[in-house]
Image: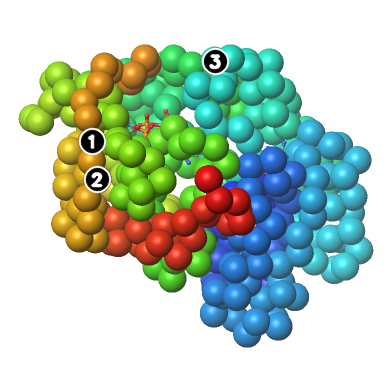
Amino acid sequence: MKTILVTGGSGFIGSHTCLALLDFGYNLVVLDSYINSSVIALKRVIGLSKTQKQSAQNTLHEVRGDIRDYKLLSKVFVEAIKNNAPIEAVIHFAGLKSVEESVREPLLYWNVNVEGSRNLFRVMDENNCRTIVFSSSATIYASSTDNLLTEASELKPCNPYGKTKLAVEELLRDLFENSENNWRIANLRYFNPVGAHSSGEIGESPLEKPNNLFPYICQVAIGSRKQLQIYGSDWPTPDGTGIRDYIHVMDLAEAHSAALEYLFSKQSKLLNLNIGTGKGTSVLELVKTFEKVNGCKVPYVFSARRLGDVSKTVANNQLSIRTLAWEPSRSLSDICRDGWRWQMLNPFGYSERTH
Ligand code: NAD
Ligand code: WQD
């Protein structure tokens, strides 16, 4: 059984991916600072894992720490070697992800996302671990066009967050091209990850007011927020609202185990892959599907366009499908049903607070 280091593994996408990886049979070391997540998430992951509860506990080892901490990261690698379970690959989720905050705090974003990643890659290199799956983002592409985005589409992020993601991809390319050693790298460019595990036990738990559409819809539907503001009704789309490619978080999670398996089968590789469904959904379509599937109301008003938004972002996912032997299998209705189950069972996410 291979041991994988998962940075940021207690977060939204990380926790779902840990479950997929445990069920795939990997041994996990999860490193997280818990700056944007709860210790409860991984406890629930262990409870959900198909592996016997006891053995799942044995295969998921949690370390509280920061990816910028060189000594701690080195210790994690060295201890794994001492325990005869050397880390053979890293899935790197840890980082900050708010576009709006990145505009206010570019120094922080470059420090955590870029410096933190550089530190991690240095420790990996020193410990002969050169296989990595990196959480990149569709946000690195230039403004959308009418066409689906392919991996060869122009890269031109328009905010500091996106620029840090592109910088890490570029650093990984330099390592791949210039190192004497063989790196195996998959940059997974996520589109819009949403929904929750079908059990409703794990899901997205924003600590503050959500910036993203799907968690906002869930909070309006349950009554913690009065109404949704739809940013713009005059986009050049059929119903005038923005179009995105919403992918179920479990489909995204499974793309990580597929990417690892693919990398393990190669000597050396650099892959950039779009992880989306290839289907566009407008804001109004998402709201209507959510209401229909869950039999609830999502009151909304139209407001001005949000600064920095684009009309349409949808993946051409053919390269991922061909390369990874993976395909998203969950529908928009599944997304709405599973996301709502999580919201109903956990009205305040993982937190106890009432607001
Ligand atoms: P998240 O905030 O839920 O998870 C990130 C995790 O990293 C959290 O558990 C947080 O505590 C941890 N973390 C942050 N800084 C850290 C540090 N310095 N050291 C150690 N741990 C740290 O976010 P998510 O939605 O699960 O996103 C995971 C990754 O995917 C991020 O890199 C994000 O940029 C990327 N991504 C997310 C989306 C999205 O819409 N959610 C889209 C594209 C890419
Ligand atoms: C989706 C659509 C909004 C909220 C962001 C980041 C991106 C990536 C994913 C990390 C748009 C509309 C939204 C609301 C609305 N994250 N909307 N009312 O903007 O596609 O991508 O998250 O890498 O970097 O930019 O996602 O969910 O914020 O918006 O009308 O309250 O919903 O205008 O059309 P976005 P989103």
Which residue lies under the disc numbered 1?
Answer: 300
- Residue 332 point in image, percent of width and height: 24, 54
203 to the left or right of 267: left
Q: Is residue 331 visible?
A: no
Residue mark closest to the camera, 3 vs 2: 2
- The Cα–Cα distance between marks 3 and 2, rounded to whole angstroms, is 30 Å
Above or below, 323 relative to 156: below
Quarter containing ligand 2?
A: top left
- Closer to the camera in the image, 73 or 87: 73
N-terminal-most mark, 3 or 1? 3
Q: Badge 2 is on which residue? A: 298
Vertical position of residue 18 compared to residue 156: above or below = below
Within 10 Å of the Cα at label 1, are there few (<14), some (14-19), or many (20+) other Cα atoms?
some
Q: Circle 3 is placed at which residue position?
A: 103
* Ligand 2 lies under 8 Å from the Cβ of mark 1: no
Q: Position of residue 107 (x, y in %)?
A: 68, 15
Direction from residue 312 to residue 152 in the image, left or right: right
